[in-house]
Image: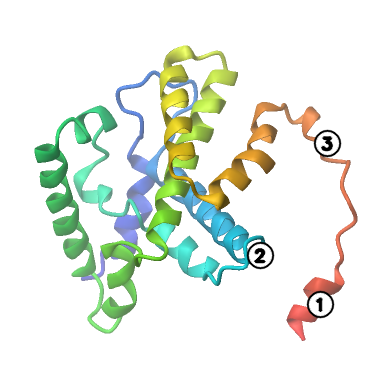
Amino acid sequence: MDSFYALIARMKNIDRWALMRSVTRENVQEHSHMVAVLAHALAVIRREVYGVPCDANAAAAAALYHDAGEILTGDLPTPIKYNNPEIMAAYRQVEAAAAQKLLGMLPEELRPAYAPLLAGPDPDLKPLVKAADKLSAYIKCIEERRAGNDEFLQAERKTLETLRGYHMPEVDYFLEKFIPAFERTLDEQGTMDYQEPNLNILSEKET
C-alpha cells in the first residue's frame, strides 16, 4: 500500500519514442511535466483570453498523472497503439486496470483525491490535456529537427495537422504566440530583452 509515490518516481525510467532514433532521449516523467505546463497554459489562455471559466490548477494536476499507468504498462509506441480499433480498445482496458492497481497502492483515505486523476480528466478538461499531450509531442519533434534529426519530420507534420484539426482557439493561440520561440537558439530568445513585470500583481495576490 505504500508504493504509490515510489512507483511514480520511476516514471523517469520509461523512455518515450521507443521506435524512433532520438538525439535527446525523453522519459515519461519529463513528458508528464511538460504536458502539465502546457495544459496549465491552455487553461489560462481559455480563461484569460477567451473568458471561459477554467481551473488551470486542475488541468495541470490531471496532466501530471495522464500517463501514470505507463509505470505498469510501459509506453506502447503510437504506430502499434493506434494500429486498429481492437488494439486500441484492449490497451484502454489495460490502462484502466493499471490505474486501479496504482490507486490500490494508496491508503484508503487518500484514494478519493487521486481516483479522478488516475481515471482521467473530467470531460471539460480532457480536450485540454489531450491537446497539451499533442503539443508536447510537437515540441519534441521541433527539437529533434533542429538538432539535425530527420527521423521526426513526418511525425512533426502529422502532429501539427492533428493540432490544427482540433479547432481549439487555445491551441491556435499557443501555436501562434509561443511555438515560434522553439525555433530559436538561446541567444536568439532575447533573454535580456523583456518588459519589466508589474510586481504589484504578485504582492496583491499575497494580501
Residue at position x 35%, y 67% in the image? 122
Q: Is residue 193 left or right of residue 176?
A: right
In percent of width and height, residue 118 lies at 29, 63
In percent of width and height, residue 140 lies at 50, 32
Q: Secondary structure at mark 1?
A: helix
Q: Is residue 142 left or right of residue 137?
A: right
Q: CA distance from mark 1 to mark 2?
A: 20 Å
Q: Is residue 158 left or right of residue 49?
A: left
Q: CA distance from mark 2 to mark 3?
A: 25 Å
Which numbered disc, 2 or 3, marks the residue that appears first in the sequence?
2
Residue at position x 32%, y 59% in the image? 6
Amino acid at pointer 3: Gly
In percent of width and height, residue 59 lies at 47, 63
Q: Nearer the viewer, residue 96 or 132?
A: 132
In this rendering, is residue 48 above or below 139?
below
Q: How is the image coloured?
A: rainbow
Query: Which residue is identified by label 2?
Result: 48
Query: Which residue is identified by label 3?
Result: 190
Q: Nearer the viewer, residue 118 or 104?
A: 118
Q: Is residue 6 left or right of residue 51?
A: left
Residue at position x 31%, y 54% in the image? 68
Q: Nearer the viewer, residue 116 or 192?
A: 116
Pair 1/2: label in front: 2
Which numbered disc, 1 or 2, marks the residue that appears first in the sequence?
2
Amino acid at pointer 2: Glu
Q: Secondary structure at mark 3?
A: loop
